[in-house]
Image: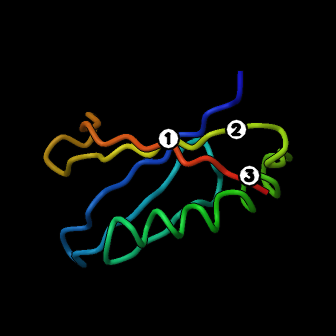
Amino acid sequence: MPRTFRVELRRCEETNVFVATSPDIPGLVVEAETVGGVMDAIKECAPHLIEDNLGLESDDGYAINVGYVSAATPSVSRSMSVEIPLVA
């Protein structure tokens, strides 16, 4: 079974941009004005961080699960969940 990495997506109320961080991928912090922009940044950055910081390569088989976290209830994920398949 491939390993799954969690990424939490939030909207910053101060700057009005989307920010993604991960408790599973050390160093992952990306932001963009749109959800699509954040997803593109995750696809670009995450594989490098996973390889450099965790020693896994895309051939090892893993997935990234992105969940939206509401500002009103930061400990509860909302229904948005997207798996990003990573291809070398």
Q: CA distance from mark 3 to mark 2?
A: 10 Å
Identified by mark 2, the residue type is Tyr
Q: Give the mark nearer the N terminus: 1 vs 3.
A: 3
Q: Give the mark nearer the N terminus: 3 vs 2.
A: 3
Q: Is residue 72 above or below residue 41?
A: above
Q: Position of residue 57 (x, y in %)?
A: 84, 48
Would you say the residues marked 3 and 2 are in contact, meaning their CB atoms lie under 8 Å apart? yes
Residue occupied by mark 3:
50
Q: Is residue 54 left or right of residue 82?
A: right
Quarter-wise, where is residue 27 in the image?
bottom right
Q: Is residue 71 above or below residue 78?
A: below
Residue occupied by mark 2:
62
Quarter-wise, where is residue 47 in the image?
bottom right
Residue occupied by mark 1:
65
Identified by mark 1, the residue type is Asn
Residue toward you, 48 or 13: 48
Q: CA distance from mark 2 to mark 1?
A: 10 Å
Q: Residue furthest top?
A: 1
